[in-house]
Amino acid sequence: MLVAKELDVKNHESYHNHERVVYFEHEAAGLKAIISVHNTNLGPSLGGCRMYPYETEEQALTDVLRLSRGMTYKSALAGLPLGGGKSVIIGNPRTDKTPALFEAMGEAVEYMGGSYVTAEDVGTAEENMESISKNTKFVAGLPLSVLQQRVPNPVGGNPSPYTAFGVFCGLKAAVKYRLKKDTVAGLKVGVQGLGSVGYDLCRFLDEEGATLFVSDINKDVLEQAKAELKNVHVVGLDDIYDMPVDVYAPCALGATVNDQTIERLKCSVIAGAANNQLHLRKHDQILHDKGILYAPDYVINSGGVMCVGYEFFQLTKNPFSYELNETNLKNHVAEIENVTMKIFDYAHKHGLPSGEAADRLAEEIFLSPDLIKTAANS
């Protein structure tokens, strides 16, 4: 039996006007989870379901509060009529996954009454979303084979390629703004982390003629990069910060831009796929003062949420005036370049670091009564 407990988080250090936070437990299925809805002004909150072996429930709560807030800002600047939410399952994704656990998670999502839409995230995959979908329709990131049974010509599926393409578009905007170049050809780019998104980003950069300096803990993927890409150099995990590159692209862990690494970076631009790249908010200003242009991560890595959003809209209701198809989705993701340029212009006009400028522009969207009304009637 699923047990739900509404949490009062107003005194939590990561509270930011969150609308609703619920703790769930299903003893028989082994589920312990938290769903956080940050803001639904523009539409239902959407955010992935993360599974992680948190040491304490307090750690899980902190994570879900921060992640759900970030999704509000991400969807607002992504031009999606969606709010921000997130869920976390406390458990080891390597050993604790069962269909029953995710079916129970589906019950938890359904309990939220449509205010939260889930999708895959760190520690979860498409097949887990399929299990969740047995008990709720408020889920995206489903396997393509499942989508094909529900809608003709489905969009969506694996969001990683769209995330990588969006990061490439945002990176190009930063290069154009800071280095006054319309192409990355001839530039040196340090890519930290060659997971699915990082590797796809390398493909885009390589095709346009950039020289790549790459690092990853996986030696096999580094060998693959050397075999497949034209101009790539493998460097040590810690050496990536010291490379004399034009662009540093963190695509692995968060918080790699911190007090220690900022002093070592020799780049002009930071633009990568990782979430929460800045360790602390103060680092936004520090980068600004040092003349390093930071492309806000939640802006340029939003291609994934666009992909998942389009899938959900196709399964429910199309909020746009155009057809939901692969071409329009890719065009939407390509707009990340223009949005990123707008952020840089706003930052320059108001004397702000780029991260703060992005936050302000997002708040103008999801806190604007007129825009909220328009989204509600779409």
Image: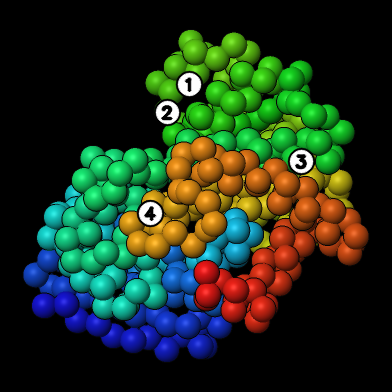
Q: Are marks 3 and 1 in contact (CB under 8 Å)?
A: no
Nearest the camera: 373 or 90?
Answer: 373
- Circle 3: element type: helix
- Circle 2: element type: loop
Crowding near pointer 2: few (<14 within 10 Å), some, many (20+)? few
351 with respect to 117 (left or right): right
Quadrant (top left/top right/bottom left/bottom right) for the N terminus: bottom left
Q: Residue at x 48, y 53 (%)?
A: 305
Label 4 to label 3: alpha-carbon separation: 32 Å
Q: Are marks 2 and 1 in contact (CB under 8 Å)?
A: yes
Q: Residue 101: where, in percent of width, then height?
A: 17, 61
Q: Residue 11: where, in percent of width, then height?
A: 52, 88
Of tags 2 and 3, which is closer to the observer? 3
Q: Earlier in the sequence, mark 2 or mark 3?
A: 3
- Circle 1: element type: helix
Residue indicated by mark 2: 218
Label 4 to label 1: alpha-carbon separation: 37 Å
Crowding near pointer 4: few (<14 within 10 Å), some, many (20+)? many
Residue 174, disc:
3
Q: Residue 80: where, in percent of width, then height?
A: 55, 60
Residue indicated by mark 1: 222
77 with respect to 343 (left or right): left
From the viewer's perspective, is residue 222 above or below residue 251? above
Label 2 to label 4: alpha-carbon separation: 37 Å
Q: Earlier in the sequence, mark 3 or mark 1?
A: 3
Crowding near pointer 3: few (<14 within 10 Å), some, many (20+)? many
Q: Residue at x 77, y 48 (%)?
A: 341
Q: Looking at the picture, which amino acid does disc 4 mark?
A: Gln
Q: Earlier in the sequence, mark 4 or mark 3?
A: 3
Task: Residue 63: name its quadrant.
Answer: bottom left
